[in-house]
Image: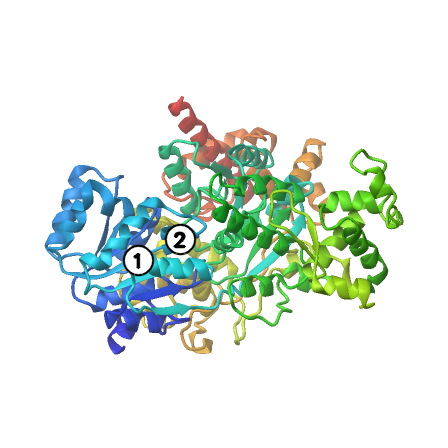
Amino acid sequence: MEKSQEILQQYFGYESFRLNQATAVENVIAKKDTFVLMPTGGGKSLCYQVPAMVLEGTAIVISPLIALMKDQVDALRANGISAAFLNSSMNPVEQNETFHQLKEGKLKLLYVAPEKLSADNGSFLNLLKNIHISLFAVDEAHCVSHWGHDFRPDYLFLNGLKRQFPTVPIIALTASADEITRKDIIKQLDLQNPTVLISSFDRANIKYFVQPKQAVLHHIVQYLSEHPNDSGIIYCLSRKGTEDMANNLKENGVNAAFYHAGISSTERAKVQDDFIKDKIRVMVATIAFGMGIDKSNVRFVIHADLPKNIESYYQETGRAGRDGLPSEAILFYSNADVMKLKKFALIEGNEEQSTLMLKKLQHMTDFAEMQKCRRQYLMEYFGESHPGNCNSCDYCLSDFENWDATIDAQKLLSAVFRLKERYGKNLIIDFLRGSKGAKITDYMRSLPTYGIGNNADKTYWHHLIKQLIINDFLRESNEEFSVLKLTDASKEVLFNKKKVHLQKVKEFAKAVTVEELETSYPNNEIDANLELFDELRVLRRQQAEQENVPPYVIFSDATLMELATYLPVTKEELNQISGFGAFKIEKYGETFVNVISNYCNQNNLSSKISEKAPKKQSAPKKANQHESGTYTTTFQLFKEGNSVEDIAKIRNLSVNTIQNHLANFVEVGTIKPSELIDINKIDPVIAIAKTQTIQSLKAIKEELGEEYSYFEINIAVAFYKWQEKENSRNKKI
């Protein structure tokens, strides 16, 4: 274990393993088959990357997506580790070079797609028989199971690995798999007496919110305006939905793009690359986007439509906050989505699969409709206990009151009983309220319970049904047109006078407000210097542009936040910062230390590294840096003839915030720069901006002097960015 600890520190910059990483690493080094279920962002990759460095030979990593392979390889190379990938994006020369490196034993890790193993009757596997293979890692292993939420037929070819390489350990990894899927993965891969490691599913840094599906665009625009510097993903059910949402967001001044399987592979690759390199702030996508996306600074995931199962929801929301910083997951829910997904769940000729899919959809519906801790429900779904009261989901943050629902529950349950448990909720409610509709027969009207629920509206009865189902007084059948059924508990209410006590919401918590953004970490952290944090982000982006890799490959936001908090001013002090291994200290240390030192000198500050607890993965507290209000309100006030200062007063916001709003509209072409500044000042700014890889307002101002304000420079740069986009668009045409 000493060797693996050394590698962890030297190459990855972490002092200790977390969750089940250490056990997984030790197991694989001992050449034992291993199954790892670990939440997204939990550090699954280290479970095979560290053993690959310890063991002799080359580790073969089976990964489903080209983008994921590239990200992983870029990150490994940035840490000084010899790694490569083989996939269809490479030309023959590149493939031959990689093959040569593999045969020469120069690679510690090689990433391949499952299709590579199955192509040409397994010719690649035959080649591997002449290579010293240290281990096989099967990433996104749920793809091998018919019961998984993202089954891939090409993964089935992997069931021959153990037969052809009986002495090579296999490690299978996934972030989301229920018990039936876990057992099927082990069976399909023919793992021999595997060690099964299941880490906690709890993503403590993510807050979960469910809201009614009303005025979705308005709510999303509001949310984005309150989080102007944050990057995130919005999931929609249909391709058209993604395009409409992205276009609407652009019209509201948001830098957004859409992604779905219907656009060309070239365009998909471009928008994905722009997103992970922070050139696009918001990605609106179908579920075609995201598997294996390793962008660590995604701050929010919004579901504009209901996911089809808990596994998908968990995996998609898990793309937020991979760096451990506070993040949010927001789901907009409607019963119409449930009805739509029920049709999709039915698989012709496969009753068993259809039943399972409907059951999984019901669990997803229960999650959205229930009144209990969302986190507790997620944990229990994956077989993990949780006490509830997480204080970081909408339920736990809401204000409730208890009420006696016995009389109305008796009315409803009696109606189900009298109608012989043959009808769904809508007809039951119509029957209770005394509907004269055609579906209510003369026989139904003759029953004593007909019309006894006309004291309340449909919404009330729908809500009561939901609560009775959640509390096990009712259940719904798993058919396409489900019917209400009585339970043992409901019979106690009807025949033994059992009381029904429920909770109702006095005030339901909305998706994260400004005041809720801070998450407390249990240590003696001090606030970060946010101006320095921004400088470090610019430096990271410049470095990433030079190396043609995503910024998070260089350092995560969490690492930059530690730098801005503890102000290390020597390369030796960088050893205390998570994410700085020996290789990165040598490669980037001097550059980052110089920026920090200059900042300290300018602000009369000194290193606070002595105040830092021993190196660990938990991240410093993120200070609140968000303003409230919408961009569109600012735009409307501006068009009405109000000055920047007037808008700031009306909206109770800083002048700087309003200026940034307006710059955003210049960048998307909605406002002309001449409406804001002297047009004669634009060209000199653009001339300097063209010489910069990443536009730095501070650097431009230093060169132009006091004659130019930051606002003028900001507007001119925004106009330059708009010009660049237009030029790019015209070239394509």
Q: Secondary structure at mark 2?
A: loop
- Relative to residue 547, is residue 614 drawn left or right? right
Q: Nearer the viewer, residue 187 or 518?
A: 187
Disc number for residue 294:
2
Residue at (76, 58) in percent of width and height: 507
**What distance separates the C-alpha of mark 1 from that of mark 2?**
25 Å
The spot of residue 703 in percent (x, y) is 42, 44
Where is 283 relative to 579, above or below? Answer: above
- What kind of residue is marked 1? Leu
* Most foreground residue, 721 or 122: 122
Q: Cβ–Cβ below 8 Å for labels 1 and 2?
A: no
Q: Is residue 642 above or below residue 594?
A: above
Q: Secondary structure at mark 1?
A: loop
Q: Position of residue 495 (x, y in %)?
A: 81, 65
- Pick the front one: 266 or 226: 266
Residue at (49%, 65%) from the top-left corner?
A: 201
Q: Which residue is mark 1?
A: 189
Q: Callout 2 environment at 10 Å: few (<14), some (14 to 19), or many (20+)?
A: many
The numbered dot on residue 463 is: none
**Residue sitting at 14 percent across and 60 percent down?**
132
Count residues near mark 1 (Cα–Cα under 10 Å), then give few for <14, some for 14-19, many for 20+.
many
Report how many numbered discs are placed on residues in the image: 2
The amino acid on which the numbered mark 2 sits, given as a three-letter code, is Asp
